[in-house]
Image: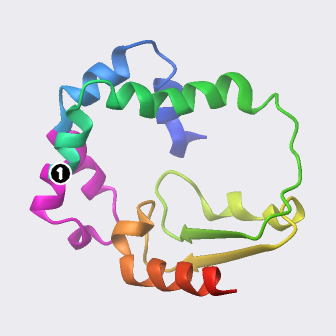
Amino acid sequence: MLRSWYVGFFQIPWLPEYLISHNARRVALGIQSSMTRREALSDADIEIYASALAQPGAMRAAINYYRAFVRWGLRLPVKPIHAPTLMIWGEDDVALGKELTYGTDKLVENFRIHYISRCGHWVQQEAAAEVNQVLLDFLKR
């Protein structure tokens, strides 16, 4: 729970989106500093992230996911998933521990997990080639 402290912060009305959108470059640099493979995010990438974070309404839309999850997610019934499912997980995720993946195969009928070592929360940036290859292999099946 401590690793995901931000979920609680996101429950506060308007303040998180205000702070993030008005400090977009600092937040983008924070994303980079939370990465295991920091070199994966270039200066140009940081500017693109900062621009996206500062867009009107962008942070409200993103944060509302966490608000809805807290309000409804834990009360909704867990239904088994029958569709083929791939989970890609960075083993050094700063927000979500690897132990959260354990037991997923009991809820997902056709489940495959791919762990990426020396990789954090931002797998698609930190290990782009590996993520793309794993996705392509999964989609070919």
Viewer-nearest residue: 134 or 38: 134
Residue 36 seen in render: no
Question: Is 117 situated left or right of 32 in this image?
Answer: right
| Tag 1: amino acid | Ile
Question: Is 52 situated left or right of 88 in this image?
Answer: left
Counting the numbered discs, the total is 1
Q: Is residue 16 magenta?
A: no
Structure colour scheme: rainbow
Q: Which residues are magenta?
A: 25-47
Give the percent coordinates (x, y) of residue 99.
69, 62
Q: Is residue 42 magenta?
A: yes
Q: Relative to 126, is 20 above or below? A: above
Give the percent coordinates (x, y) of residue 117.
49, 80
- Residue at screen point 30% across, 51% down: 31
Q: Relative to 119, is 121 above or below? A: above
Our reading of the magenta stretch's main secondary structure is helix
- Please give the residue where the numbered disc 1 appears in the rendered image: 48
Give the percent coordinates (x, y) of residue 123.
44, 68
